[in-house]
Image: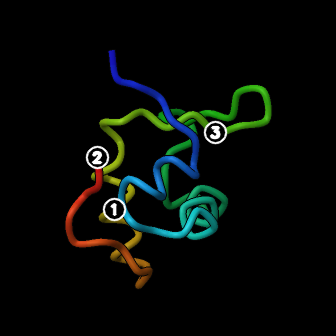
C-alpha cells in the first residue's frame, strides 16, 4: 500500500507550491477520488506524485526537475 501525505508534504517532495497543487484539485485537473479529503486534510498517495508533477507542468507551474526524498 502506498504511503499517504498532505499537500504540503507532496509539494516539498516535488518542489512545488502547496497552493498550486490545491488549485489543481479545486479546478478538477486532479482526481478527488484518488486523493480524498479526510478530516479536513487531503491525503495524497505517494504513487500519485508523478501525475501531480505532470499536471503542474501542464498548468505552467514551477516544479523541481528532480524529486526530493
Q: Position of residue 63 (x, y in %)?
A: 35, 73
Residue extending farthest bottom: 60
Q: Which residue is mark 1?
A: 53
In the structure shown, which secondary structural element does the residue marked by tag 1 occupy? helix
Give the quadrant of residue 58: bottom left
- Nearest the camera: 11 or 52? 11
Q: Which residue is mark 3?
A: 42
Tag 1 near tag 2, CB within 8 Å: no
Q: Residue at x 58, y 52 (%)?
A: 8
Regarding mark 2 in the picture, which secondary structure is present there? loop
**Residue 51 location, x and y as percent?**
32, 53
Label 2 or label 3, whichever comes before in sequence order:
3
Q: Residue 5, image x and y in percent?
A: 51, 35
**Mark in the foreground, 1 or 2:** 2
Residue occupying the point 54% across, 33% down: 33
Where in the figure is residue 68, as x and y percent of width and height?
29, 55
Q: Which mark is residue 25?
A: none
Left or right, residue 36 beside residue 65: right
Q: Is residue 26 above or below residue 47?
A: below
Q: Considering the image in quadrants, where does the N terminus appear?
A: top left
* Nearest to viewer (mark 2 / mark 3): 2
Task: Residue under label 2, please give it.
Answer: 69
Q: Residue at x 50, y 61 (%)?
A: 29
**Front in this rendered view, residue 22 or 16:** 16
Q: Residue at x 40, y 80 (%)?
A: 62
Q: CA distance from mark 2 to mark 3?
A: 20 Å
Seen in the picture, residue 3 relative to 25 is either above or below; the reply is above
Crowd tier of the residue under label 3, counting other residues whose Cα lies within 10 Å: few below 14, some 14–19, many 20 or above:
some
Amino acid at each position: 500500500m502506498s504511503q499517504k501525505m498532505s499537500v504540503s508534504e507532496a509539494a516539498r517532495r516535488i518542489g512545488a507550491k502547496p497552493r498550486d497543487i490545491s488549485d489543481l484539485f479545486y479546478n478538477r485537473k486532479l482526481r478527488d477520488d484518488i486523493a480524498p479529503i479526510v478530516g479536513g486534510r487531503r491525503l495524497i498517495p505517494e504513487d500519485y506524485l508523478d501525475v501531480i508533477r505532470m499536471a503542474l507542468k501542464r498548468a505552467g507551474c514551477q516544479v523541481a526537475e528532480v524529486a526530493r526524498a
